[in-house]
Image: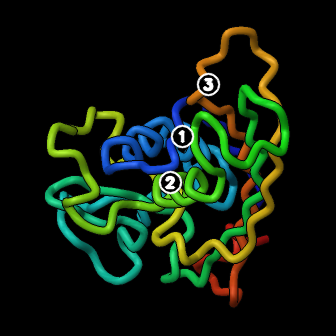
Amino acid sequence: MHFTLTYSGNLPSTGNAKVKHDIRRKLHPQLKELWRTHPGLAGASNLVERENGEEGDSSDAAFLTDIQGNDFATLVHPHYYLYAELDILMLRPEAPGAVISQAGDIDNQLKTLFDALRRPTDHSEVPASWSPTDDETPLYCLLEDDKLITKVSVETDRLLIKDSNPKEVQLTIRVNVKGTAATWGNIGMIA
């Protein structure tokens, strides 16, 4: 499965839970639309929905995790032997090749991004002030765990928008979802 996510906004090199969750929330509508429209996912809503609000068997709501009463739905999940390869284009309002920038160094910016692409691991990674909207129940995330990223390619270039905020970036994230094994459950996701 191949698809592209986009993000425009702050990507600090030292991201706290609020920053990472804000990025997660900005990516959520794109992932929700992917689940609604992709042929391999559209008929699999049982993987991200609880029946009558309760936990189901191993296949029901398998991609759904409850963290302090908030549901998070992930796409790339080890339960279905999935992993992801990422090809990232990062546009920043500075000359290409500037590894240390006003926004911070690129490797730590990427760590912030990878943390934002995965679901929170526990309540400390969800801002206490956040209350999901109806549209954010569940909140869709790309990864169950950022360890499921097996390959990353990053290209930086200059964002050519006059008077851009020097701390903001525009990202194009091409995602390739693959499987370590083909199963009846993941065949539509890796085909």
Residue under the image location 68 percent in, 67 percent down: 189
Q: Earlier in the sequence, mark 2 or mark 1?
A: 1
Residue at label 3?
A: 166
State the count of labels: 3
Tags 2 and 1 touching, CB below 8 Å: yes
Towards the viewer: 13 or 79 = 13
**Among the 4 quarters of the image, the one containing residue 30:** top right
Task: Indicate left or right for 84 with 108 as reference.
Answer: right
> Separation of disc 3 and disc 2 at Cα?
17 Å
Of pointers 3 and 2, the one earlier in the residue sequence: 2
Q: Crowding at label 3, few (<14), some or many (≥20) Cα neighbours within 10 Å?
A: some
Residue 11: numbered disc: 1
The CA distance from mark 2 to mark 1 is 7 Å
At 64% from the left and 86% from the top, the residue drawn is 183
In the structure shown, which secondary structural element does the residue marked by tag 2 occupy? helix
Judge depth for marks 1 and 3 and give the one in front.
3
The kind of residue on which mark 3 rests is Pro
Question: Which of pointers 3 and 2 indicates the residue nearer the eye?
Answer: 3
> Residue 25: which disc?
none
> Is 191 placed left or right of 61 in the picture?
right
Residue 25 placement, left or right of 147: left
Choose top left, top right, bottom left or bottom right for residue 92. top right
Image quarter where the C terminus lies is bottom right
Q: Earlier in the sequence, mark 1 or mark 3?
A: 1
Residue that appears at 24% across and 66% down: 122
Question: SS for tag 1?
Answer: loop
* Residue 112: mark: 2
> SS class of the residue under badge 3?
loop
